[in-house]
């Protein structure tokens, strides 16, 4: 019989059963060891998978909440774009009207362009009428859209939660109700007062044009008679008859010529003729003729010496180029007829008047002098030898006045033209004075219209302007058994909730005026093939202002300067130049702040920021929102459960709805501005 194992052998057996099951005699791992290691690894892996799944599913509620908040803010972003475009249209249409009205005032002040000024002012009036109708329709439409925004935000955000899986959630806008102020869109820019000033300016400028034409015609006629004609004229006659040197007998081109030129020339001419006057032959008749000519030259020199020409500060003239007599009737109205200048002698008991003491009939004693008036009255007798009387005196200038080879012939033309010129220039000065007065009235009216246009822009604070707060919950969910059932007991992810908030931030990387460029392009396409009316003429101006709305102040001034400086004839009148500068200054000083047209994009933000701005306590409000969320897919019920009533102000029809209408000035064409209600509200 074999001996049983000794004590030491039993110890070795126990050691074999504890370690040798995993490690053999050579130090290698046994099959049992490998199996156990694999089992432990699988258990740990399944545990980690389960933990990861639970963590990921737990975090999904926050992701869905973020998506809901962004979806709500995206609705607000779309509305902000629409509102900005409509406001830009209203403002820039008003600006286009103001530039056109300013151009109308300027053109109205240019003599001869009254009809064009009236047409331009009427165009401005039509632009303002269209702007007013468009602004009113835009205000009504935007109010309806803002009234529907809460429903749109709730619908779009709830749809996102539903599409993401088994989530229940909604985003609420803050503020819930609109706090926008559209009163600025209702402000009427009334151009009536400025248009009336323009109408009166047109009348005054037409009178100025007529007076200027008369003045120019009279001046040209006088210039031709003085020195402008190629043939005989005052200058040529002064040279031929008196031998005046060129320094005393200059020639002028019309722009440099004034009525002072013929006056100075006449003084030199009559002084020379008087100094050189002598009988041209023998005989008593020539003695009488020479005496008459000398008397006429003395009289003419005296008259032209008293003549004057002065340009007055107001643009009128004080002008006197005296007419000289050319017959007996005219002689009797002069001082030469009444002056006691003719020598007399006592002949046979009578006082006899002579042409000169050299008269052969002057044989008696001197009896002083007498006038032709006295001769005609019979106070003195006419000399039968020299036969000096009013007829002889009146004949002296008659021939040189009535035919075109005499100096007096051209002087009469100049003198008569000077009278017409003086009347015309003074009428012109009066008309221009009235224009300056009316221009002041037009300036005040224009500035009032600009003040109405420059009122603060509409204040946009629609629902969701501060942000949208989303609250999302998820129910308890089982961990998938096919992943961990072989190693772990059944487990579930408990119910959870998450809150998120989103607001709008400007996208600096985007071009703000792209949307306005596209909008104006669409409006232009709407006018293709149709009579564009007034807008066809000023459409480019409006387009330039609209597309440049982002820096409105600079663009308006540049556009106004280009339009106003491009008006022909402005430099021809100080009134129109002043009005042009006034219009540019009024536009420059209107204080039009540049608009920020950068697109607003939704960004996540701290929900506490939004709730604090709305006046809610953050923690308690979130708990309250979570507790009130119903188990329903109806976004309206979501909102009602949170104490908010939402409704559709745009109507029940899902499709395009007109929110504003743009009437093309001067036409019956109306272009609707629409939004898609279905796209706004979303699938829900």
Image (spheres, rainbow, N blue to C red):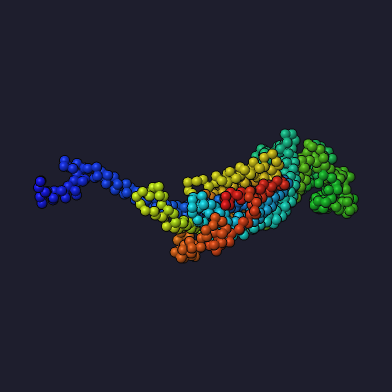
User: Does residue 104 appear in this view?
Assistant: no
**Residue 66: where, in percent of width, then height?**
46, 53
Residue furthest to the front: 1
Residue under the image location 57 percent in, 50 percent down: 682
Residue furthest to the top: 231
Residue nearest the observer in this picture, 81 or 545: 81
In the displayed structure image, the side of residue 345 where residue 214 appears, left or right:
left
Look at the picture and state if 338 lies above or below 398.
Answer: below
Residue under the image location 80 percent in, 40 percent down: 400
User: Does residue 407 appear in this view?
Assistant: yes
In the displayed structure image, the side of residue 250 where residue 167 appears, left or right:
left
Residue nearest the observer in this picture, 338 or 169: 169
**Residue 663: where, in percent of width, then height?**
68, 48
Residue under the image location 50 percent in, 56 percent down: 169
**Residue 298: where, in percent of width, then height?**
75, 47
Look at the picture and state if 387 lies above or below 157.
Answer: above
**Residue 601: where, in percent of width, then height?**
50, 50
Look at the picture and state if 153 lies above or below 357.
Answer: below
Q: How many marks?
A: 0
Quadrant assignment, res 239: top right
């Amino acid at each position: 019989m074999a001996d049983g194992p000794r004590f030491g052998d039993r110890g070795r057996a126990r050691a074999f059963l504890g370690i040798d099951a995993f490690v053999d005699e050579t130090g290698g791992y046994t099959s049992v060891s490998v199996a156990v290691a694999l089992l432990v690894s699988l258990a740990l892996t399944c545990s980690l998978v389960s933990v990861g799944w639970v963590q990921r599913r737990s975090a999904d509620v926050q992701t869905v909440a973020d998506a809901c908040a962004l979806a709500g803010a995206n609705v607000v972003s779309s509305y902000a774009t629409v509102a900005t475009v409509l406001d830009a249209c209203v403002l820039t249409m008003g600006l286009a009207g103001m530039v056109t009205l300013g151009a109308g005032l300027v053109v109205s002040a240019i003599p001869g362009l009254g009809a064009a000024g009236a047409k331009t002012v009427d165009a401005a009036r039509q632009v303002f009428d269209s702007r007013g109708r468009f602004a009113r329709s835009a205000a009504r439409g935007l109010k309806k859209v803002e009234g529907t925004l809460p429903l749109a935000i709730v619908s779009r955000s709830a749809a996102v939660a539903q599409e993401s899986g088994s989530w229940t959630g909604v985003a609420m806008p803050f503020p819930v109700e609109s706090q926008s102020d559209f009163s600025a869109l209702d402000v009427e820019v009334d151009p009536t007062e400025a248009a009336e000033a323009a109408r009166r300016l047109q009348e005054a400028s037409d009178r100025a044009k007529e007076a200027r034409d008369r003045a120019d015609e009279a001046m040209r006629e006088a210039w031709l008679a003085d020195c402008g004609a190629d043939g005989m004229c005052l200058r040529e006659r002064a040279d031929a008859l008196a031998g005046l040197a060129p320094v005393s007998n200059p020639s002028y081109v019309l722009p440099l010529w004034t009525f002072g030129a013929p006056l100075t020339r006449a003084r030199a001419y009559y002084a020379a003729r008087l100094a050189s006057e002598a009988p041209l032959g023998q005989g008593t008749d020539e003695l009488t003729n020479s005496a008459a000519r000398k008397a006429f030259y003395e009289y003419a020199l005296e008259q032209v010496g008293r003549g004057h020409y002065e340009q007055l500060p107001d643009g009128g003239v004080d002008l006197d180029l005296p007419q000289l007599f050319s017959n007996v009737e005219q002689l009797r109205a002069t001082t030469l007829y009444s002056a006691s200048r003719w020598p007399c002698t006592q002949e046979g008991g009578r006082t006899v008047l002579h042409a000169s003491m050299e008269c052969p009939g002057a044989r008696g004693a001197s009896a002083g002098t007498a006038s032709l008036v006295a001769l005609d009255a019979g106070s003195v007798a006419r000399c039968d030898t020299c036969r000096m009387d009013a007829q002889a005196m009146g004949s002296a200038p008659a021939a040189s006045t009535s035919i075109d080879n005499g100096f007096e012939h051209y002087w009469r033309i100049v003198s008569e033209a000077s009278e017409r010129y003086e009347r015309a220039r003074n009428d012109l000065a009066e008309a221009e004075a009235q224009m300056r007065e009316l221009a002041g009235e037009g300036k005040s009216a224009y500035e009032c219209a600009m003040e109405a246009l420059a009122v603060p822009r509409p204040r946009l604070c629609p629902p969701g302007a501060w942000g949208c707060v989303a609250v999302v919950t998820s129910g308890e969910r089982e961990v998938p058994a096919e992943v961990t059932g072989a190693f772990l007991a059944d487990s579930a992810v408990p119910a959870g909730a998450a809150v998120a908030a989103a607001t709008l931030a400007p996208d600096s990387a985007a071009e703000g005026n792209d949307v306005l460029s596209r909008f104006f392009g669409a409006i232009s396409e709407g006018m293709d093939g149709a009579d564009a009316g007034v807008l066809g003429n000023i459409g480019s101006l409006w387009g330039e202002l609209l597309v440049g709305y982002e820096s409105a102040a600079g663009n308006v001034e540049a556009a106004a300067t280009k339009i106003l400086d491009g008006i022909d004839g402005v430099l021809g009148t100080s009134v129109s130049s002043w009005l042009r500068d006034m219009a540019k200054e009024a536009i420059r000083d209107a204080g039009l702040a540049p608009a920020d047209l950068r697109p607003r994009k939704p960004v996540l933000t701290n929900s506490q920021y939004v709730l604090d701005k709305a006046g809610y306590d953050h923690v308690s409000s979130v708990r309250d929102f979570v507790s009130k969320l119903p188990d329903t897919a109806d976004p309206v019920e979501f909102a009602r459960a949170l104490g908010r009533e939402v409704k559709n102000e745009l109507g029940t029809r899902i499709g395009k709805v007109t929110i504003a209408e743009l009437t093309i000035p001067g036409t019956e064409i109306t272009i609707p501005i629409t939004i898609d209600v279905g796209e706004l509200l979303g699938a829900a």
